[in-house]
Image (cartoon, rainbow, N blue to C red):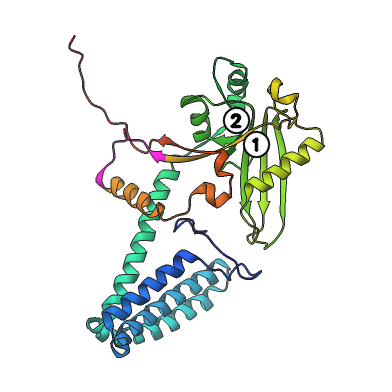
């Protein structure tokens, strides 16, 4: 998941070590696989062939990964090459001896390995194709537009405080998808725009944040960091952040509506989560269609972004915006009247 080869899943950390994890989806997948093995082979003796070939392939993969790790750690070239040569020769010897087991059950291990590899590879290529066309723009180019939108009373107000979850990690840039959602779809007018970026650190505990003001009390960027064992409850953390800012006199948390303000009602907040979808007017070749369909299929296994972030569902809007990854389709059409 960190390498973007698999969609996000719920992760439980039973200890303070980041490497010790429990993923419910994977656990149920393993359970289903074990049932399938038992139902297909029925006897432990018939499972030996599948197990032997799987172990040989696993040893080869481990050697390759370890050699690559030594290479990127800049270990002496002769040591890396010698290590790779010796263990590859040793493990290919075992693999050759186990190839005779292919027809006796080894095929099962190979099918599982190839299937998982193809799913991961197609997901990676599909994500790469999409991300290549997801852009960040300079927010300074849209500040006048935001101010004009805030002052345009002919547009119904979406919320007093509109909170966008963004990928951009500095106040100088913003996701182009957010700009599209704010201006090109139904305009989203608000008194204050918040852009929140979340970073998960390699430490188990601890949470911190930084606030960068883009337009005082009108547009604010927040960078939120917390440890991998800290519960993903961005809504709770964000509420604490705005309370701290109110105490510091940076913002006003009372309702901006006069009838509510005089009774001390708090201002309203709404979260916006944006999903980028490939536009229907893209002219895709068969390979690109396969990549996008495969990506969407695997992506369907992931937990929703709003659940992953722990946002308040009753005050959260999830919407989709189009991205163009290919030449726009062109259809000749004539008016007859």
Name the image quarter holding residue 138: top right
Q: Residue at x 48, y 76 (%)?
A: 81
Which residue, given by chain and number where applicable, does mark 1 sit on?
171
- In the picture as drawn, the residue positioned furthest to the right comes out as 248
Residue 325, located in which quarter of the rendered image? Answer: top left
- How crowded pointer 1 is (Cα within 10 Å; few <14, some 14-19, many 20+) is rated as many
Question: Mark 2 sits on what residue?
Answer: 139
Residue 283 within the magenta-colored segment of the rendering: yes
The segment highlighted magenta reads: 277-286
Q: Is residue 300 above or below residue 247?
A: below
* Marks 2,1: beta carbons within 8 A: yes
Above or below, 249 relative to 231 = above
Neighbours of disc 2 within 10 Å: few (<14), some (14-19), many (20+): some
Measured as percent of width and height from the top left, residue 183 is found at 51, 25
Residue at 44% from the left image edge and 43% from the top image edge: 132
The residues bearing labels 2 and 1 have C-alpha atoms spaced at a distance of 8 Å
Q: Residue at x 62, y 48 (%)?
A: 198
């Amino acid at each position: 998941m960190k390498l973007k080869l698999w969609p996000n899943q719920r992760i439980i950390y039973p200890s303070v070590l980041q490497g010790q994890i429990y993923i419910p989806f994977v656990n149920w997948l393993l359970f289903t696989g074990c049932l399938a093995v038992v139902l297909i082979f029925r006897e432990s003796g018939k499972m030996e062939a599948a197990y032997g070939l799987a172990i040989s392939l696993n040893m080869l993969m481990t050697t390759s990964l370890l050699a690559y790790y030594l290479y990127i750690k800049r270990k002496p070239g002769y040591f890396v090459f010698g290590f790779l040569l010796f263990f590859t020769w040793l493990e290919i010897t075992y693999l050759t001896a186990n190839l005779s087991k292919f027809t006796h059950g080894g095929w099962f291990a190979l099918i599982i390995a190839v299937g998982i590899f193809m799913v991961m590879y197609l997901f990676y290529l599909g994500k790469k194709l999409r991300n290549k066309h997801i852009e960040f723009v300079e927010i300074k180019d849209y500040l006048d537009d935001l101010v004009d939108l805030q002052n345009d009373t002919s547009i119904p107000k979406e919320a007093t405080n509109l909170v966008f979850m963004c990928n951009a990690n500095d106040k100088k840039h913003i996701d182009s998808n957010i700009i599209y959602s704010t201006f090109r779809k139904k305009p989203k007018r608000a008194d204050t725009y918040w852009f929140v970026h979340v970073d998960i650190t390699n430490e188990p505990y601890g949470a911190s944040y930084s606030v960068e003001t883009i337009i005082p009390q009108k547009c604010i960027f927040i960078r939120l960091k917390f440890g991998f064992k800290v519960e993903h409850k961005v809504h709770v953390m964000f509420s604490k952040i705005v309370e701290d800012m109110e105490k510091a006199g940076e913002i006003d948390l009372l309702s901006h509506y006069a009838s509510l303000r005089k009774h001390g009602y708090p201002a309203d907040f709404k979260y916006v989560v944006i999903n980028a979808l490939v536009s229907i007017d893209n002219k895709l070749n068969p390979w690109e269609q396969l990549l996008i369909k495969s990506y969407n299929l695997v992506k369907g296994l992931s937990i929703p972004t709003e659940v992953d972030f722990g946002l308040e569902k009753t005050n959260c809007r999830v919407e989709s915006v189009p991205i163009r990854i290919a030449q726009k389709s062109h259809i000749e059409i004539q008016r007859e009247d």
